Amino acid sequence: MAGGGTTGSSGSVSSYMSKKQVVCDCGGVAVVRTVKSGANVGKKFHGCPKWPDTECKFVKFIDEIGEMRSELEELRLNLFERDVIISQMEYQRQMNEEKIQKLEFKKDSMKEENMELKQQLRQMKVELTRATTNEKHYSVALLFTWVFVGFIQLVRKYI
Ligand SMILES: [Zn+2]
């Protein structure tokens, strides 16, 4: 029924899944079968889905090594892409860490600055309080001076 190397074989639908769909001469989607006997035993091919109840002699051998090679190439490409993505992510992560460190540093310096400002404020408050007290003392001293001067003048009048 089937032509070529499949003569006398009872090809069965294989579990082998080819990614590419192959269209049979009769219009159906060819199924993957394995050659059971003959020179091409073990080889996989796309055959007519209606076989053996058909006159269609469609046979297309699968270049397994070629497909495996391209699959390997694809995997290699995927691996490469994955590596690129991983290194990009690693880079991004490093950038983020740097950013976090910078922010952390900024936060620390801001904290320091804040503390410094607080301390300055506290010092100013203390100085202000001291100044007010000094002013009070000064005023009292001034008052005493005037009182003393007035007293002296009063005493002079009577001497
Ligand atoms: Zn067919």
Image (cartoon, rainbow, N blue to C red):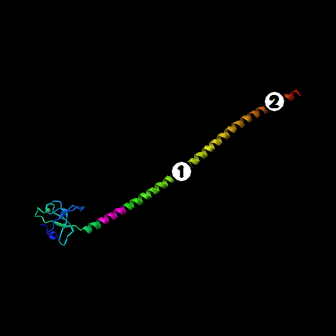
The quarter of the rendering in which ligand 1 is drawn is: bottom left
User: Would you name the residue on which mark 1 appears?
Assistant: 106
Q: Amino acid at mark 1?
A: Lys
Helix, strand or loop status at disc 2:
helix
What residue is rendered at 49% in x and 52% in y? 100
Q: Amino acid at mark 2?
A: Gly
Task: Return the residue nearer the eye: 147 or 91.
Answer: 91
The alpha-carbon separation of the residues under discs 2 and 1 comes to 64 Å
Contact, CB < 8 Å: mark 2 with mark 1?
no
Residue 87 place in picture, x, y as percent: 42, 60
Q: Looking at the rendered structure, which numbered label has been put on residue 41? A: none
**Toward which corner of the image does residue 81 lie, by quadrant?**
bottom left
Residue 24 place in picture, x, y as percent: 16, 62
User: Would you name the residue on which mark 2 appears?
Assistant: 150
Residue 55 place in picture, x, y as percent: 10, 64
Task: Return the residue nearer the eye: 102 or 72.
Answer: 72
